[in-house]
């Protein structure tokens, strides 16, 4: 155990002092840029961050731009990367933002970004593992005989957990199983995206509000399409309550329809972004102390920074899985509330006594 922690400590120390492209400003801009750009590090980029010895630490991504020039002509252009777009003469780099050179405007930017790549990677890996495991079960491995290998055993434990303790526990038994594929996909995809963010040069896709909002909107759409007559009745026409009370409750319920996915998106986004910022800020102390007091001070504070980062990394692994679980659980709760067939006990009571 001690040897494992020592190796992890040394690995993080090496990564922290060998990735200036992540934490420190470029040497040529040292006078104008801060020693550590936290928000710039966690922001979405038009490139993937890689080790410094690979293409200078950046692999630029393709750009798809739907824009309108100064003459009012709209066009859709493709460039292999930002540099090629600037080299074409149609665009310029204005404060690190791609802008039409003739004063036009970019209407829609369909470019591939770092967060989008890791979103695809997380969902793609979840899909790949699920298809691979499904092939095993079709061959009888895990069905006719016990599961083989650590991967299939972990997969089965997670799948049964989502099916029994998340889907069936919160959605009617006769409806729950049809939502299991969606809930399991959400759990696995979000978990992978969260864990990817722990890699030294990777980005945390779930630290992007557009990603979490997209996932929350999908849950919102599924929830509304799953709504029963009773669900919509309790939103627009509360049975058994006076009309003047309905006038108060209906707007509240309509607002609640939208606050639920909003809470889903913000919760996941805020938790993953704050964790990423915390790790970068703590490791950034090395560069700050080195810049202010010299390299000796930077090396001295690295003992504290890297030790604390090791602890935070262990906590982040737990948080990554916990946040994936919470998002999936709340999605199941919202869907279950909409798909439930309500029993109007109050109305039944009145009908029985009237008879």
Image (cartoon, rainbow, N blue to C red):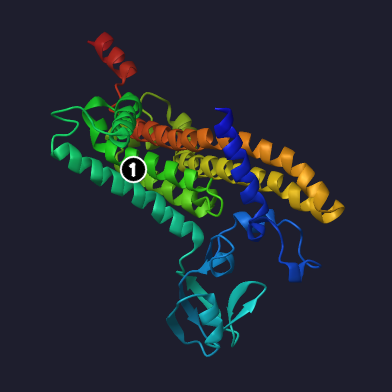
Residue 308: x %, y % from top left: 67, 36
Asked if residue 152 can be seen in this view, the reply is: yes
Label 1 crowd bin: few (<14), some (14–19), many (20+), radius 10 Å = some
The residue that mark 1 highlights is 185
Whether 249 is drawn above or below 118: the answer is: above
104 relative position to 215: left or right: right
Asked if residue 274 can be seen in this view, the reply is: no
Whether 312 is drawn above or below 207: the answer is: above
At mark 1, the secondary structure is helix
Q: Quadrant of residue 176?
A: top left
Q: Residue at x 30, y 48 (%)?
A: 127
Whether 313 is drawn above or below 146: the answer is: below
Between residue 278 and residue 307, name the one nearer to us: 307
Residue 248: x %, y % from top left: 50, 34
Q: On the rendered image, what quadrant is the C terminus found in?
A: top left
47 relative position to 35: left or right: left
Residue 263: x %, y % from top left: 51, 40
Between residue 142 and residue 340, name the one nearer to us: 142
In the image as oriented, which residue stretches furthest toward the bottom? Answer: 71
Q: Residue at x 37, y 23 (%)?
A: 240
Numbered marks: total:
1
Q: Residue at x 65, y 45 (%)?
A: 13
Q: On the rendered image, what quadrant is the N terminus found in?
A: top right
Whether 121 is drawn above or below 104: the answer is: above
Q: Residue at x 79, y 68 (%)?
A: 32
Residue 114: x %, y % from top left: 50, 60
In the image as oriented, which residue stretches furthest toward the right? Answer: 293
4 relative position to 181: left or right: right
């Amino acid at each position: 155990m001690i040897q494992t922690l020592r190796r992890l400590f040394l690995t993080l120390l090496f990564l922290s002092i060998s990735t200036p492209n992540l934490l420190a400003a470029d040497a040529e801009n040292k006078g104008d840029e801060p020693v550590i750009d936290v928000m710039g590090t966690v922001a979405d980029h038009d490139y993937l961050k890689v080790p410094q010895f690979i293409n200078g630490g950046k692999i630029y991504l393709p750009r798809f731009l739907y824009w309108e020039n100064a003459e009012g002509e709209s066009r859709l252009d493709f460039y292999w990367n930002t540099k090629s777009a600037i080299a074409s003469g149609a665009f310029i780099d204005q404060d690190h933002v791609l802008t039409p050179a003739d004063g036009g405007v970019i209407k829609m930017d369909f470019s591939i970004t770092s967060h989008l790549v890791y979103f695809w990677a997380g969902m793609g890996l979840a899909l790949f593992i699920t298809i691979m495991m499904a092939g095993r079960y079709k061959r009888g491995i895990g069905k006719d005989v016990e599961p083989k290998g650590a991967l299939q055993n972990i997969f089965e434990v997670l799948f049964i957990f989502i099916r029994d303790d998340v889907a069936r526990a919160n959605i009617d038994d006769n409806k729950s199983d049809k939502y299991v594929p969606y809930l399991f996909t959400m759990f696995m995809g979000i978990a992978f995206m969260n864990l990817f963010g722990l890699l030294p040069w990777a980005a945390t896709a779930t630290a992007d509000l557009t990603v979490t909002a997209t996932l929350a909107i999908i849950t919102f759409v599924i929830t509304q399409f799953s709504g029963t007559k009773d669900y919509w009745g309790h939103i627009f026409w509360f049975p058994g309550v006076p009309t003047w009370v309905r006038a108060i409750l209906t707007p509240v319920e309509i607002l609640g329809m939208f606050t639920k996915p909003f809470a889903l998106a913000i919760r996941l986004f805020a938790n993953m972004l704050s964790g990423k910022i915390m790790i970068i800020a703590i490791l950034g102390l090395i560069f700050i102390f080195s810049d202010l007091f010299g390299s000796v001070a930077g090396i001295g504070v690295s003992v504290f920074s890297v030790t604390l980062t090791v602890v935070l990394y262990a906590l982040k692994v737990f948080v990554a899985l916990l946040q994936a679980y919470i998002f999936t659980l709340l999605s199941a709760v919202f869907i279950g509330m909409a798909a439930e067939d309500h029993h109007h006990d109050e109305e039944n009571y009145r009908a029985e006594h009237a008879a």
